[in-house]
Amino acid sequence: MKKVTVPEQSLGEKVVKHAAAIKVAMKESVYPLTATVFYPRERKKMPDNFRGYLMFDPDKCISCWECAFVCPANAVQMKEAPNKRYYPTVDYGKCIFCHFCVDSCSGGALKTTKIHDVAYKDMDEMLTLTEEMIEEPEIIREDKKLVEYEIDEQDLHLKRTREEDTLFVEVTPPVEIPMVSQCIEPESCLGCRICEEMCESGAISSIIERQVVKMAIDRDKCTGCGLCVKECSMQILRLVRK
Amino acid sequence: MAGIAIGESEWEVTVPEKPLKDKLYFENLKAKVIDTNLCSRCLTCACICPVDGITAVDGVDFPDYEAKCTDCGACVRVCPRFVYEPKSGLGTYIEFIAGRSKRFAGQDGAMVTELIVSAMEMGMIDRGLFAGRDEKWAIEMFHVRDPQQLAIPTLGGTKYTFADVLPALKKAVRFTKRGVGVVGTPCIVSGVRKLQQEFPIFREKVKLVVGLFCTENFHYDDISKFLQEKGVDFDKLIKTDITKGKFIATMSDGEKVKFKVKEVEDIVASGCNVCTDFTAVESDASVGSVGSAPGFSTVAVREEPAKKVIEYIKEKGYADFGEAKPEELDYLINLKKGREKNITKPI
């Protein structure tokens, strides 16, 4: 068995080490090193792609329902708008802020904000309708300082600056790989033309000549949104790299 | 009739000709098959319909087809009776044997269950479509992916009611990794073969088709009403069977209600009056009770996949095998062949 012993130290070394310890104690009693952000008077600086309150742009939405399908908490539900299109609503009572909906949105209609304090007075308000997601929400801001975390070699420091953070930022979308829809198994095509009906950009066309249905996908018009791929009942359409 | 690729993003689909021009394909199907009482209610059309519009609540129908139907002609392409080529006889077979499963209980020898489960154990298929029932003897489809699921006692045993096997098949072929096993009446077997002929996914994924010997079938509403009139209590009913021209309903307390099959003739589904196939000649293996000793099932092994499964069962000793007599089937085969005269001329 190995025995732990006190290391041999000279008197000089002991004095230096005690002095260092007293110095830290003095410093902490005067200017304590804490990592507390005094919210709401201060606000922590969030990264631009912070997963916060969601905003929505109906012009970019193609009603593909992908956000509602992907939502693991079932917080995103689609609702019919007066223009007969389906747009998402978010129930913040269920939302876990995973932002799978933002990631899955092929049109870039769902956007994130830096608002982390998504709080409501009652449960009914938590269901955010599409109309409420278009405009920037009204929030009460008391923060005067912006706090940034800085890590040097060992310690975590808080850097405070007297400025207000902008909560609504335009995040540059990630570089998209251009995709295009393609029929991988023409043999199984029913000729039901549901894909044509679904296509937002008018890329899919069909011509019926007697007993022959001629289908064609315009590769230039196709935006690679994937609506046709999802709706194809025989699942013979795929998105491939352009 | 199938689609062919022309270019990278262009393809052509050849659709069938319409006997009634200026009408939707479904209207053609309705006029030629459903309204002429040719329809066997196999629901191959419902399986392939891209908008899932075809239903079979009270006969096969497509409610609201004017609005929903895309007029693709898929239902006509796959319907086994749109261009009806009646099949009859015993069909070709590699082996004609009687079997009794040692592992399962079911109708007679429970060979249908045994075939599907053994195919699952061999890794040939990873799911089988079984027709289960609720306590009122209405059919519910089950996707069996694990032999343990067969502990549900209602999955085995014959039900004399139509089952929605094929609508469930579309989902099954999509989710399967290895293959699907299907059990069905001769009309369902014909539907599967038609699907396989037209679409590669069914050729690749449907690995085992077990046909059942079938004289006729009944609509649920008709047969349940008839049985209730005969004093059959559905809460106690555990087994239905047709043996030697008699319909036998067995109760849980051992009581049996028997009557002659002739009495149910009036409620036989109209599509069965024109069906001439008793032994499901197009299946991989046909199973039934006629032609073997009581407690045994007759198995007509027709195709290579079924042959492999039977060899696997023999190797593992899962079932007792005996002799079956094909000539005992002659009476029913001829009875069904006689229905050929009921087929009216096409419009």
Image (tube, helix red, strand yellow):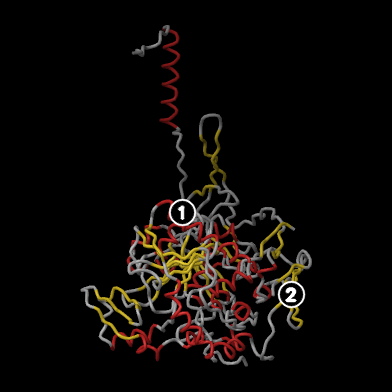
Going 63% across and 66% down the picture, which residue do you hit? B200
In-front residue for pair B80/B126: B80
- Image location of residue A94, percent across then percent down: 44, 61
Is disc 2 in the same subunit as disc 1?
no
Image quadrant containing the C terminus of chain A: bottom right
Q: Against B1, is A53 above or below?
A: above
Task: Say which chain tag 1 marks.
Answer: B
Going 42% across and 11% down the picture, which residue do you hit? A14
Residue on which disc 1 sits: B312
In-front residue for pair B11/A73: B11
Residue on which disc 2 sits: A205
Q: Secondary structure at mark 1?
A: helix
Q: Against B18, is B144 above or below?
A: above
- Image location of residue A229, percent across then percent down: 64, 66
In-front residue for pair B240/B242: B242
The CA distance from mark 2 to mark 1 is 51 Å
| Foreground: disc 2 or disc 1 | 1
